[in-house]
Image (cartoon, grey):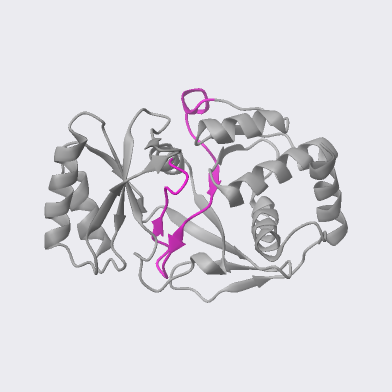
Amino acid sequence: MTDRLDTIDRAKVASAYHAMSFIESGMSVGLGTGSTAAWLVKLLGARKHIEGLDIQCTSTSEVTEALALEVGLPTQSLEEADWLDLTIDGADEFDPLLTLIKGAGGALLREKIVATASDRMIVISDLSKQVDVLGAFPLPVEVVRFGWQATQGMIGDVLGEADVAEEHIERRMRNGEPYVTDEGHYILDLHLKRIADVDALALALLAVPGVVETGLFIDIADTVVLGASSGEAQLLRADEAPVIVDDLDEARLQAFLDHIFAT
């Protein structure tokens, strides 16, 4: 793999590259948001240019949409697609049941809509995102701006009854201003450290007036492609032994990367 990548990016590229094996010409594919998903988009653009891959893409954020168009991938709205063959996206954390925390990039609502409008969701990740119990990464909750402080107070009440290790809530900021999602909402980041019962917490949060969606993805992902800096990957499925994938075609990947760095 090219020396232009650091160890972290090598693992992300390996995960994205191996996940591409699930994509065939003629498919409608959901494209995730985040740094690992960005590598997938770039690799798919290179694959289209070099190998003629013919797919239609639906983006989970305006950032991903812009990148997809930049690398030459044809895009369509979810309304135009109606249904997708698969969605490939990253995760901020995942546990042994492949329950996810997502939303660091602020696109959790669109990500969940696109993922659940697909036959399957594949997660691309690296070892740093694998945990035994969710919660070390802050849990994003998307809320409407009207009355957000009241919503935050009610979320605090929910956390007081939940089995979590911490109950700190912060409104997400960017460049000194409140962060606003593509749908015009705020995000509250819940610092919980440990979530003992993700199902109960998700239901309780969604019952709070003003909460639009949470970053808990439960029973949505069926496979995690866990990339390593060596170029190999593990395919993880809930309650199954990992499958090692080490058939990396170095020349093919290098051709894709050369195209990416040249454009």
Residue 260 magenta-highlighted? no
Q: How many marks?
A: 0
Residue 213 position, x and y percent, is 30, 42
Tell me which residue sits at (42%, 70%) in the image. 96
The C terminus is located in which quarter? top right
Side of 256 where 203 appears, left or right: left
Tell me which residue sits at (53%, 44%) in the image. 87
Query: Going by the picture, which residue comes out furthest to the bottom?
Result: 241
Observer-nearest residue: 200 or 262? Answer: 262
Is residue 239 shown above or below 33?
A: below
Residue 165 position, x and y percent, is 24, 69
Residue 15 position, x and y percent, is 64, 59
Residue 151 position, x and y percent, is 17, 40
Side of 240 where 201 appears, left or right: left
Observer-nearest residue: 74 or 176? Answer: 176
Is residue 146 shown above or below 116?
A: above
Tell me which residue sits at (48%, 41%) in the image. 118
Asked if residue 218 shows in the view, the reply is no
The N terminus is located in which quarter? bottom right
Is residue 229 shown above or below 33?
A: below
Q: Which residues are magenta?
A: 77-106
Asked if residue 186 shows in the view, the reply is yes
Side of 226 where 79 appears, left or right: left
Is residue 113 shown above or below 220?
A: above
Query: Going by the picture, which residue comes out furthest to the front?
Result: 176
Residue 91 magenta-highlighted? yes
**Magenta stretch mostly in which secondary structure?**
loop
